[in-house]
């Protein structure tokens, strides 16, 4: 399994590959991943707007919601062999994960998930129902990480939550996981933190 993180710091593209050790990381080239030209253009446009002036240009909230929608599209195009995460940390980060009560979210504190009742966040009833359905699909299946469509629906729900909570929090998504992914063999095109064509 290849893990991708979706964020925009210090790069022209927000896709990063995580290797078998959590600190093995390298920039993932959208073209070599085989992403469609329209999606590559939208990723580049999203990053071009992440210049520290989001409040003036698109609005920070719109930028955060769009990040989750782009991550959803990346997940659908990459398919089931990849997991696309939207990574955030800090005291204002909320995590949409499979474990949880009802539609509640998690907040990571000192690396451990803490339950956060969703009723305290102002999330709509419609979005809460989507979370219930999303969680129920995996409870009756063979566990995580689910297929690409299930993961993409999680990203879509995360985008809805982000839009509804506004700038009070940043919503993160790890394919339904609360923990870091298991270590995996090094793919042949990933050596020394560099993306390499196969």
Image (spheres, helix red, strand yellow):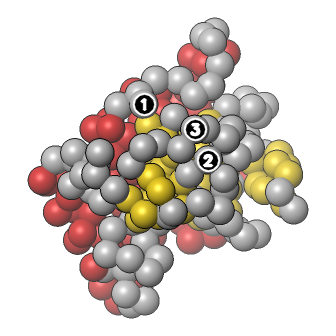
> Camera-side residue: 33 or 143?
33
Q: Marks 3 and 1, Cα distance to the nearest angstrom?
A: 14 Å
Check the image and name the residue furthest to the left.
37
Assign a secondary structure to mark 3. Answer: loop
Q: Marks 3 and 2, Cα distance to the nearest angstrom?
A: 6 Å
| Residue linked to disc 3 | 185
Picture residue at 37% right of the left edge, 87% below the top: 51
Assign a secondary structure to mark 2. Answer: loop
Residue 130 is situated, as x and y percent measured from the top left of the image, at 52, 30
Q: Are marks 3 and 2 in contact (CB under 8 Å)?
A: yes
Picture residue at 61% right of the left edge, 47% below the top: 20
Q: Earlier in the sequence, mark 3 or mark 2?
A: 2
Q: Earlier in the sequence, mark 1 or mark 2?
A: 2
| Residue linked to disc 1 | 81
Q: Marks 1 and 2, Cα distance to the nearest angstrom?
A: 15 Å
Relative to 145, say whether 165 is above or below. Answer: below
Picture residue at 76% right of the left edge, 34% below the top: 100
Per the rendering, the mark at residue 20 is 2
> Is residue 116 in view from this perspective?
no
> Camera-side residue: 3 or 124?
3
Picture residue at 46% right of the left edge, 42% below the top: 187
């Amino acid at each position: 399994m290849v893990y991708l993180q979706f964020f925009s710091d210090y790069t022209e593209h927000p896709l990063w590959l995580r290797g078998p050790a959590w600190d093995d990381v390298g920039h993932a080239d959208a073209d070599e991943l085989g992403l469609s030209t329209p999606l590559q253009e939208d990723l580049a446009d999203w990053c071009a707007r992440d210049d520290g002036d989001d409040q003036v240009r698109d609005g920070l909230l719109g930028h955060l919601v769009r990040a989750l929608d782009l991550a959803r599209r990346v997940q659908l195009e990459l398919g089931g062999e990849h997991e696309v995460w939207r990574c955030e940390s800090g005291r204002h980060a909320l995590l949409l994960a499979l474990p949880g009560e009802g539609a509640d979210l998690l907040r990571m504190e000192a690396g451990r998930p803490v339950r956060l009742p969703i009723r305290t966040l102002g999330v709509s009833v419609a979005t809460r129902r989507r979370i219930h359905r999303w969680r129920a699909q995996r409870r009756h299946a063979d566990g995580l990480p689910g297929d690409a469509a299930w993961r993409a629906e999680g990203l879509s729900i995360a985008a809805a939550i982000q839009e509804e909570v506004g700038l009070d929090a940043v919503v993160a998504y790890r394919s339904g996981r609360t923990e870091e992914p298991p270590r995996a063999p090094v793919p042949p095109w990933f050596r020394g933190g560099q993306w390499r064509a196969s």
